[in-house]
Image: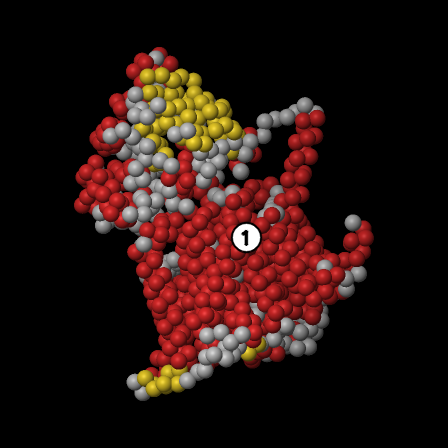
Amino acid sequence: MMLAAADWFGAGDSTIRTALVYVLLAYGIHLALRTGTFSLAAVATYGTGAYTAGALALDGWSPVAAVAAAVVQAAVAGLVLALVLARLRNLYLAMATLAAVLLVHVLALEWESVTGGALGLLGIPRGVTVPQLLVIVALCTLAVALGERGRTGRMLEALRLDDQLAASVGIDVVRARRVAFVLSAALGGLAGSLSALQFSVLTPDEISFALIVDVLTIVVIGGTAAWYGPLIGAVALAWLPELLRWTGDLRPIVQAAIVVVLVVCAPDGAAGLIRAVAARLRRLRRRENGLDVVPAVEGAVR
Amino acid sequence: MTLLEVNGLVVRYGRLTAVHGLDLTVAEGEVAILLGANGAGKSSTLGAISGVVPVAAGEVLFAGRRLSGRPPHVIARSGLVQVAEGRRIIGPLTVRENLELGGYAVRSARLRGERIRMVTDLFPELGPLADRPGGLLSGGEQQMLAIGRALMADPRLLMLDEPSMGLAPVVTDRVIDAVADIAARGTAILMVEQNVSAAFRVATTAHVMERGEITLSGPASEVAGSPHVLRAFLGTADTPQVIEETTP
Amino acid sequence: MGDYLRDAITLGGVYVLFSLGLTLSWGVLNILNLAHGNVLVAAALSAYLLTTQVALPMALLLPACMLVGALLGLGLELLVFRPIRARAADEESTQLAVLIGSVAAGALLYAIAERITDGRVRAVDPGTFTVTDYLVAGVRVSNLQLLIVGVSLVLSVLLALLVSRTRHGRALRAIAVDRVTCGLLGVPTARLAAVTMATAGALAGAGGLLLALHLGSVEASMTESLLLKAFAVIIIGGVGSVGGAILGAYLLAGAEVFSVAYLGSGVRDAVVFLVILGLLLLRPQGLFARTAWQRS
């Protein structure tokens, strides 16, 4: 384990930066999924946030102001999307937000005066260091982890399971979903703006279908069962190329195949696995202490 | 002759056991009713027999063939057809298309046509509605369509899950009469019904389920007269919940 | 004017072949198959691989590509979608898991396609098929354009007839509404799901071949823009509607061709997004969709 961690940190500065940015983007998707909303809006605002921050930084804005502006822009975009798509659920919502991602890609290509067209934005001043990034990721992780406890945690769970159930215990379902949608979009914008301020180059190719594949890979590997899922997923995604170096030219194929196998065989991801193991351990301990309460309720909820 | 034989049936949902060790037989020509309070495991039993609910243990034999573990469509094609609770009419399909769907396994269009005529003889109400989308029918019409649709497969045993649910008393009588007609033509019936008095009008055999087990079985007349049933289901004693169940 | 009409009809033909499979798997099985475009690419690639080896006549090449598409569709269903469906808890989480599964499977197909093409654009030349132009009512029309229109017309009409007239089609429409009840009525739902995915794949296979011939080339990423067009088509036509998809494909192609002709090429994608956005706002169930009671 220690060796693996050392390996990972040896993987290079840019890998670490990418992984940290992906953690934030994955939290954006995670937040939506936790409320039972299948929205890729965070990927779309990742794109708009990146271009907003990149263009403003090129105009001489300070990094903090550029990131703040990008997050506000992303949140507003999220609110607009939430209002426009309010009536859509499930596959319809997935399709509409996917279309939004593709729209951002097309905009990045076509709106040359702002985005630089196919060449993208060049020479964006670098304004975020790895320690700063680590702090931001830690804060967001803490916020998500706290949000999954107590009252809001129960609210999220109710929303994910059943709208009627949620409404019956006094949750304003429409409003709660809208809030989650906006927060998800804001997180996407934050991730995008931080990415733009690190790599000095931003091209339309960064906001394409491949980004969706990466994000969903994180979701698959990490799982959505708990706050540490996206963390594990993003680290694993960044680490995979290193881990699969021995496959040579075949690496992209092997990596994609691994993800397919995981989707089919381990749908709950690492977080699901950890939770299942923890639950089993708890039960064992309880049994040893002779306190085996019949866990029928758990079974009924499943 | 025994048509359906269920031995030691167990149904589980996660760690929750809905049916434990149920034995049941239905003979040819028999009209068996399965009674019990909500949550006694009646629907789980029917679901396990028809294959939509997994069988955790035990076996289901139909006409001597082992059916447990087979997929629902194979079970339906072997002559054991269930009319699901809540009728489950395919709303966008017309009445005729719903009936045709019930005869999916029948390759000959001519034979399907004959069966449709047989169904509309039994339920003349459906005749003029043939081209209307099933979703627009009234509750009673939908129940007749659901039963007619099941008959399209020419079942040897027809299972009904609460056919009277949500129907007005007059319509309930109409449906129960139809069940009697179907039985008179030689089709065996296994019916779950909350409206106990209606069910006893047609039943030859009755089984009482409590907490996942059969606690009482026998000829309908005997079971109907047993103090146990009178107390628990017919509301002669202080059992207000029965009233709720029969008039939802 | 005639030229524009010809272009719109040709483009519409490609859109139809691509969108039909997508709307079919969504409408019948609740699968939003994002690997659908990769199936199309795989078929186009197999045309490229086949034609570099042997000179196949069109009468063999088209069935071969459709077969490749059908096998891939079948593989997706049996190896990815069915196992996911078997373990998922409820309908909503199943749809989500299957969607993610399709993205993963699509990424795998994409990686393989990238390897075969070496990341480059590959020229497709069947050798046995030379493009020649004819004059039809004063408009120059190539035999390739006629082929595209003919194949898409024949396949879509066949599919429409299959769905509306046969007992299998009736079963497919019923599965779309209530899979469990269909099983209780003796309909082999698992087998029909496999048939549906194979059919969708075969349609994409035909589309892949014709698109490759139309462009004269194939590359791994040629479908991303097509996916967006298919979304627009499905939104116009309503999910699961064969007739709606056909109409939607030609409407969209017409809107694109004529707006590009009169407003310039920059508006091409704008038109697609306007269609998607407008319909999502005004009529999310599609222009030709079933009304509320039919979906109940």
- Residue B99 coordinates in the image, percent (x, y): 28, 44
Q: Quadrant of residue A242?
A: bottom right
Task: Out of B188 and A202, give the one closest to the viewer.
Answer: B188
- Residue A34 coordinates in the image, percent (x, y): 56, 49
Subunit of label 1? C
Q: Residues within 10 Å of mark 1 (few under 14, many from 20)?
A: many
Q: Residue at x 66, y 54 (%)?
A: A233
Residue B9 vs C127, above or below: the answer is above
Q: Quadrant of residue C180?
A: top left
Residue B246 vs C90, above or below: the answer is above
Task: Out of A256 and A146, give the one closest to the viewer.
Answer: A256
Q: Residue at x 75, y 61 (%)?
A: A246
Residue holding disc 1 = C80
Q: Residue furthest top?
A: B227
- Residue A211 coordinates in the image, percent (x, y): 60, 64
- Residue C91 coordinates in the image, percent (x, y): 47, 46
Q: Residue at x 42, y 69 (%)?
A: C15
Q: Residue at x 46, y 38 (%)?
A: B70
Task: Out of B15 and A48, give the one closest to the viewer.
Answer: B15
Q: Is residue B229 visible?
A: no
Q: Is residue B3 visible?
A: yes
Task: Out of C93 and C177, give the one closest to the viewer.
Answer: C177
Which residue type carries mark 1?
A: Val
Quarter of the figure with the N terminus of chain C: bottom left
Q: Helix or strand or loop: what does disc 1 sit on? A: helix
Residue B5 vs C285, above or below: the answer is above
